[in-house]
Amino acid sequence: MNHALIVIDVQNDFCPGGSLAVPGGDEVVERINAMMGAFEAVILTQDWHPAGHSSFATSHSGKDPFETVQMPYGQQVLWPDHCVQDSSGAEFHPALRTDADLILRKGFRRHIDSYSAFFENDRSTPTGLEGYLRTRGIERITLAGLATDFCVQFSAVDGARLGFDVDVVMDACRAIDLDGSLAVATATMKDAGIRLS
Ligand code: VGL
Ligand code: ZN
């Protein structure tokens, strides 16, 4: 049974100085680099939005970042512009090892956000990652990266729902923690049978 490390969104915009900086976001880099050698596969995800993406507050007149709106697929938090395709903010943190097997981009459709590495935010449009893992004989996945309470959580819960054995290395993750979202994410992941270490 193969075991993959999935590194979520360790990109400049989610690190200090970035447009959607996660407190301590850069602190995960060395920890993640050191973990990489222990897995049969390493996958990096990259949040990769077109300019004017519908998850950006600037695309909604009268709305500020961190407010929510109703989208056809459900509630959506509005974010500062971040991880715009080909911008320096969308690049991986410069110290992150990028000698990975696969780099999976997500969030590239203008009208739908994609927190999870497996599905867009309608929770049903696949990214293709499930097929990649299955055809490589990977049944077990370990997650780390940014942000614990958004993209890490959504990826972990979807992975568990698809039947993968999932664990999250919490000290190799950092959270945005919007209105208690870290506590909710932690409880949700535990309820889904995900091991947190
Ligand atoms: C993320 C908000 C918007 C994340 C991505 O990587 O957790 N959060 N886009
Ligand atoms: Zn995003």
Image (tube, grey):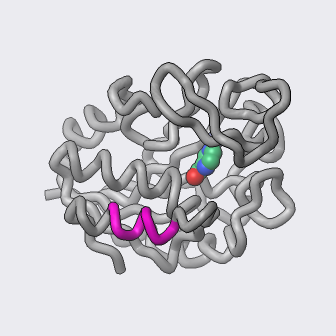
Q: Quadrant of residue 47?
A: top right
Q: Answer above or below: position of 73 versus 67.
A: above
Q: Nearer the viewer, residue 24 or 67?
A: 67
Viewer can see residue 106: no
Q: Determine the image quadrant of residue 119.
A: top left
- Number of numbered discs visible in the structure rendering: 0
Q: Quadrant of the N terminus?
A: bottom left
Residue at screen point 78% across, 25% down = 59
Q: Quadrant of the C terminus?
A: bottom left
- Majority secondary structure of the magenta segment? helix
The image shows residue 187 at horizontal and vertical percentages of 35, 68
In the image, is residue 7 part of the stretch drawn in magenta?
no
Residue at x 69%, y 39% (from the top left corner): 78
Spot occupied by residue 117 in the image (x, y as percentages of width and height): 43, 42
* Residue 18 visible here: yes
Q: Which residues are magenta?
A: 182-188
Residue 141, position as x, y percentages in the image = 29, 58
Is residue 70 positioned above or below 134 on the image?
A: above
Image-based side of 153 in relation to 85, left or right: left
Q: Is residue 185 magenta?
A: yes
Vertical position of residue 23 compared to residue 145: above or below: below
Q: Is residue 127 rendered to the left or right of residue 53?
A: left
Question: Residue at horizontal 86%, vertical 62%?
Answer: 17
The residue nearer to you, when weighing 195 against 7, is 195
Q: Quadrant of residue 153?
A: bottom left
Comparing 132 with 61, the one in front is: 61
Residue at 71% x, 48% y is 66
The x, y position of residue 35, in whole percent, is: 45, 74
Q: Nearer the viewer, residue 5 or 116?
A: 116
